[in-house]
Amino acid sequence: MRKRINRNVLLSIYKKLYKFYSSQKWWPADTRFEVIVGAILTQNTSWKNVEKAIKNLKKANVLSSPYRIGRLKKGELSRLIKPAGYYNVKAERLKNFLTFLTAEYSGSLNKLSHQKTEKLRQELLGVNGIGPETCDSILLYAFKRPVFVVDAYTKRIFERHKICNKDLDYHQIQKIFMDNLPRNYKLYNEYHALIVRLGKEVCRKLPNCKICPLGKRKVLANRIL
DNA sequence: GACCAGGCACATC
DNA sequence: GATGTGCATGGT
């Protein structure tokens, strides 16, 4: 039997984070398509490296529409996204998404955006290379659906703060957040972004973290994040 | 030079 | 079903 959590805990952590960091203005991208490309490129990769890859794509003028990337040869695409790492797999994954979009929606993100959330999720998960987190990032940040994104930071931070059990999988952790927070797109958008900000900034500064807004530095010092 | 970063698919047991 | 492994760059 799972431990029941206090409904207010998640919201109060959110408020602390927001007060401390303020809005993160996510997702950092100019277009919906750029969000999707970024979501695939950032898989297990620092955003700094993804930025370099995105810059290359923009410079080559292929990020303005799915059609343009779709026309690139895989080798050429790999070369452009090289700084983001795993460039061969990621080129394949981008291609897979574009093949799906072309085949099922005539290459139109607008058409895709009319689908209901559950259908959209199933379709995205059907693309080889799009797993739960990438899928939910796309749902949340590209299509503004109220879906909570769980990532490595979320797991680490909330496990160590005893809010999630260590053995919970992606969907179970997601459910804890979604069952205990209002289903609100803006809230989920900001919350996930704040968690990433906290993870990035605090993680490396252990064990002498002075800025953790969660106020549990003793636990933090034991390598919480 | 080791370790990490906004995962995922696939092989093997 | 659980666990292990390959994929790869660039910063600390």
Image (spheres, coloured by chain):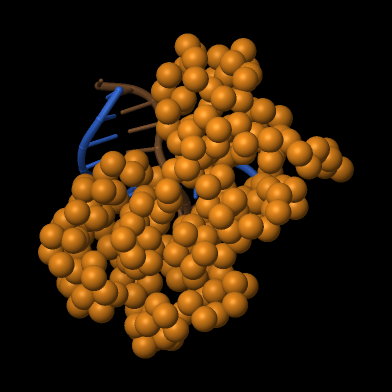
Chain colours: A orange, B brown, C blue
Q: Which residue: 62% across, 36% down?
A: A15
**Residue projecting furthest to the right:** A1
Where's the N terminus of chain A, which quadrant? Answer: top right
Location of residue A116 by image quarter: bottom right
Q: Which residue: 31% across, 61% down?
A: A30
Residue B9 vs A172, above or below: the answer is: below
Location of residue A101 by image quarter: bottom left
| Visible residue check, residue A219 | yes
- Find residue A139 and report its horizontal and vertical position in percent: 52, 64
Residue C6 vs A111, above or below: the answer is: above
Q: How many marks?
A: 0
Q: Residue A23 versus residue A197: which sits nearer the camera?
A: A23
Task: Tell me if A39 is positioned left or right of A168 in this view.
Answer: left
- Find residue A146 and report its horizontal and vertical position in percent: 60, 61
- Find residue A125 and report its horizontal and vertical position in percent: 52, 68
Q: Residue A21 versus residue A203: which sits nearer the camera?
A: A21
Residue B3 vs A134, above or below: the answer is: above
Q: Which residue: 76% across, 39% down?
A: A8
Q: Which residue: 40% across, 77% down?
A: A109
Q: Residue A125 versus residue A215: which sits nearer the camera?
A: A215
| Visible residue check, residue A131 | no
- Find residue A51 and report its horizontal and vertical position in percent: 26, 48
Task: Tell me if A83 is positioned left or right of A105 in this view.
Answer: left
